[in-house]
Every structure is written in structure tokens, then in C-alpha cells.
Image: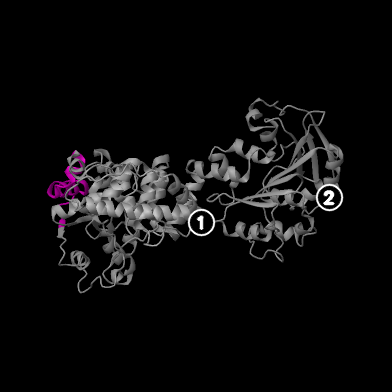
Amino acid sequence: MPASAAGDALDLRNAPSEIIYEDDDCFVRYRGLEEIGESVIVTFPDLIHPTTIDALGWGEPFFLKRGRAVISILQKKANWFQNPGFFDAMARIREFVGSTVELICYGGSMGGYGAILGAGALRATRVIAHCPQFSIDRSVTPFERRYPAQAEEIGAFIWNVADHYSASTQYLILYDPTHKVDRRHRTLFPMTPNWTSIPVSGSSHGTLPTLIEMGLSQQIFDLTVGTMTPVELRLAIRKNRAASYRYVRRMGNLSQLRHPEFGPIFHSIAERQGYKKLQKKWMVSVSRLSSEVVVHAGLPKTGTTAIQGWLSSNQRLLDGAQILFPREADERHQFGQTWLSAGMITGDFERLKSALQAAGRKSRRLLLSDENIYLVASEAKPEIARQLRSVLEGCEISVILCERDLASWKKSFYLQSIRNRRSNSAHRAARLWGTSLLYEPFFQDPFVNSLTDYDAVAEKLANLFGTNRVTRIRMSPEKDIVPEFLGAIGISGSSSQGVLWKNPSLPDIDGEILRQANALGVREAGFIKRLLLAGTETPLIRNPKRADELRSIALGFSWDGFRFEANPPLDVTEQLFDSRLKGLRRKASFLAEAGHS
């Protein structure tokens, strides 16, 4: 039955029932229409489920109200289905429904074990087992210390679940990978293609109630009847997990013990979801933040890449100075913390909270470096600025600005704005990238012009972070900016000798040609940039697919959009422009011909 039709299904909770098997250990009851449909759910009870003949089967109402007939196994005692007649009962179920009816096994904990044990004999299509045990026989699973009374009474298991697997059955195992014992049970089951693990982190030994808290009851049904895939359920869990008190409580508690830097994230979730007890419980860890924060806020094109590269590769020296500089392994070719400036636009400061707590836990100053802060300082909305200051409340904040003479900076920033890939980012500076404007009109833009007022931006930064400690370093051709910066943060006697991380500006001629290419379109600008940055012999690149794309562009590329145009202070003559353009056309021609050789 498709998920969309489940709400219109005939409610079978008042359907007649029939005992189809009974022995000294269990009852087996069918409830549904007299004429058995195409499929039936077979449910196996957990340890604490009622076991009388009049009791509801495990999950029975859940499936009946969605129009699915149910066969309930009703154990007279909790013995992990070590009934001598267990497989006689399974044979009777298959005989009762006939050979063509689809059977689906469903159970949790002890019932998860039973569902796996019986599936082969039932010739079941699939098994949904919530946190099942492989065994509680101490000789088989010595790590299992739960259920001592049942383990002692049962003794050695008469059925080995591994002897009853079916290659034609799909086994779906839901469990919490953070639960040590349940995780060890899961490793004892096969890892073959017909066995699929569905992790429900934070659920402990209660995957089902956790999923229900997440509002995923219908998805559990859909998974059971085969109208939802395990991947789709995992995506739904990821989307809805914050709605589960169990998930937030367990994962938040674990973060306090194992990864305190994530503590503020779960505190924020608890605050957002209204889990007041958890907020109060975790308040101590959230307040244990770094007491001193140093923010390197730019400017762009003042040696930022060299500074960040040095900081990233000299962690030992930073450790000696009691400084924590977060390393962002998930940001390729990026040494700094660009998430900070992004947070000033979006209001998301979770990573800042994590970094503050990590520094506080290690009793270190927190050093953050993000040149984009300079660009977005004037854009932060008042409510986001208040939120930022609230996160930093109680911390001693200092801001470092690296500056250079205005004329040099404007030219370098202009060339960077030409070179950077065009972006639809929320902040205005990113929308400057890939500019096709001439130099003068570019700096006539009110926002761009505001960036040239160093004093005004420094004041905005001081207000934004709630500090009067702003250190301004002057960049000059005669000095290496890295030692200057290190001196400002209290590391003396170090130099940047051997640092390879540089972000040089484009030559003036290349900047002018690329500016004109930007006016032609993103695709054309990308092609010209490839030609400009390629070697002298050929612009071919290692990726064959990308090389083929470039050849395709080269074959149909029109050069009519390029013409010399004076654009001071870029030092470009008409002769130099024509010569460089001619060389690029030769490269493009070589590239196009290479595709036909």
C-alpha cells in the first residue's frame, strides 16, 4: 500500500481475531479480515510486553489502524523464543496464510531477535528489527550483562540465530551506534548486501520511541511495508532529530564527556526546542568559554593568506603561547575561519560557540582570522550584532587590522574583485566578484567606497565586537607582515621565512583582459582565466573531462568582445593589450586543434 494511501486504509482494530497456534510457551493470533490480503505483518514482543492471550500484540494497533492484518506472537514468558515449538509455530503461520501471501517480520529488542530468528522459516520478505540482540547466552555474548534473571533461567540457547538466516530476506536493523552493547550485538550479525543497518544515534536502547518523538511514525510504517527506503528514512531522521528529547539529551550528554566543543550546539538546540531541564543542566559547560579572543579582521590583500598559512603550520609555537587557532579541515585551500563572517550575515554562531568552548577547555586565547569580516562589518543587522556580542559576553575581545597605503590597496582589491569567481552570496562584497566595471566606476559604488575609509570601518568593527581594543598594523614593501602580526599577538622572535602561502594579484594586463571577459559571461570569464593562468605551451589540464569542456569552448569562442580601453591606474598600453590578447588566441587555437588531433 503506498504511503499516500495509508491514511485512507480500512481500520482493522475491530476486526475479528483467531488463535491459530498454541503450545506451552506461546500463543499465535491472527487479526484482520477473514479473506487474507496480499501481505501480513508478523510481530514479535519485547521483554516487557504483556503476554496473556487477551493482550494486544507488539505493534498490533499501529499496523491494524493502517489497514494491515497482523499475526501476533504472544509469549507466555520472556525466554527469547527458546521454545521447543518455535519453528512449529512459524510453519503454522505460513500454512495459515498460504504460500503466496507476503510476510513481514517486525520486533524490538527480544522481539527483534525473534523476528530475525523466525524470518527464514516464514519465508519473510523483510525484517524490521529494532536494537536486536544476537543472543543473551553468556557463553556467546559475554559482554551482555543486561537481563541477568532471564539469562540465568534460559541458560544455553537451543536455537542459534545464525543457523536460520535467509539469503532471500531483507534484514533492516535499527540501532544506536553510540550504545556500546547494542553496537556489539550488531557487529555479530552479517554485513552482506541483504542486511542493512539504520543508525538512530542518541536513541540508546529505544529506537522506536525516539523515532516516534521525531514524528516519524508514518515513516516507520512505510519502511516496514517497503514504500520507503533505508536511505530515505535516514534523511528523515537527520531532518527531524532535534524534535526528539531523547536524541538531544543523549547526544548532548555525550558531547559534554567526549567532545565538549560541541556542547554549545546542543545547548542551543535545547534552547530552541524548549527543553528547559537540558538548558539548565548544560549551562555550566556553555559558560566555560575562552576569556580572551583575538579577531584578525582583514583587510583583504594585506598578507592574510601568508599569516593564516603560518598559523596553520606552526601549531606547536601557538601551543607554547597558549593560543588556539582552529584548523578547518573541511575547507580546502582555506586556512581561516570564514564561518565567522558568514555568521555575521546569517546569525549562525554555533561554530563560534564551539571554538570558544574548545579554547576555554584548554585555557587558551582564541585566535580567529577572517578577512571577510572587514567586508561585512557594516552589513551586520543590529539584532545579529547583539547576538554576536551575547555569544562573546564575558570575553576580552581585541581586533587586529592589517592595512596598507590606500592607492596600493585599492588597485590590489580591484584586481582581486576582477579575479574572484562571481557569487550570489548574501553579503554585498561577494556580489562584487567577477566585476566588469572600470576602476573609477568600481570605486564610485557607495559600498566599495566605504571600504576605503579605514578609520570608519575600524570604528564599526569596534562597535560590532563591543571592544575598544583595535590594533592596526601597517603593511609596507620593506617589511614582512607575518612577524608584525605575530608581535601583535604576543609571539616574538619568529619569522615567515619559507612560507609558501601567497595570493598574488593579477598582472595589470591580465586583470584588464579578464575584466572584459567578465562582461561576456561566467563561462567565458572562466575560459579566459584558464588561459591566463596556464603555462606557456598549452592550457590543457589534467582532468580530461574539464579539458574537453575547454576545447569545446575554444572551438566556438568569439574574440569580438575584446578591445583596448584605458583603465588607469592599471598600467596597460594598447600594444601590450594586443600582444597579450594575440598570445591568448594562439593558446585557444592550439587547444581547439588538440581536440581534433
Q: Is 363 or 568 nearer to us in this picture?
A: 568
Which one is nearer the viewer's eye here, 556 or 100? 556
Q: In this rendered view, identify the residue nearer to me: 381 or 538.
A: 538
Q: Amino acid at mark 2?
A: Phe
Q: Is residue 7 magenta?
A: no
Q: Is residue 392 visible?
A: no
Q: Is residue 5 visible?
A: yes
- Give how far apart the Cα atoms at labels 2 and 1 are: 59 Å
Q: Which residue is mark 2?
A: 87
Closest to the observer: 245 or 162?
162
Residue 43's spot in the image, x, y percent?
73, 42
Q: In the displayed structure, would residue 162 be above or below residue 174?
A: below
**Residue beneath disc 1:** 544
Secondary structure beneath dot 1 equals helix
Residue range highlighted in magenta: 446-471
Would residue 450 be counted in the magenta stretch?
Answer: yes
Quarter of the rendering occupied by the N terminus:
top right
Q: Is residue 99 above or below residue 318?
A: above
Residue extending furthest toward the bottom = 493
Q: Where does residue 516 sit, x and y in percent of width and height?
A: 29, 44
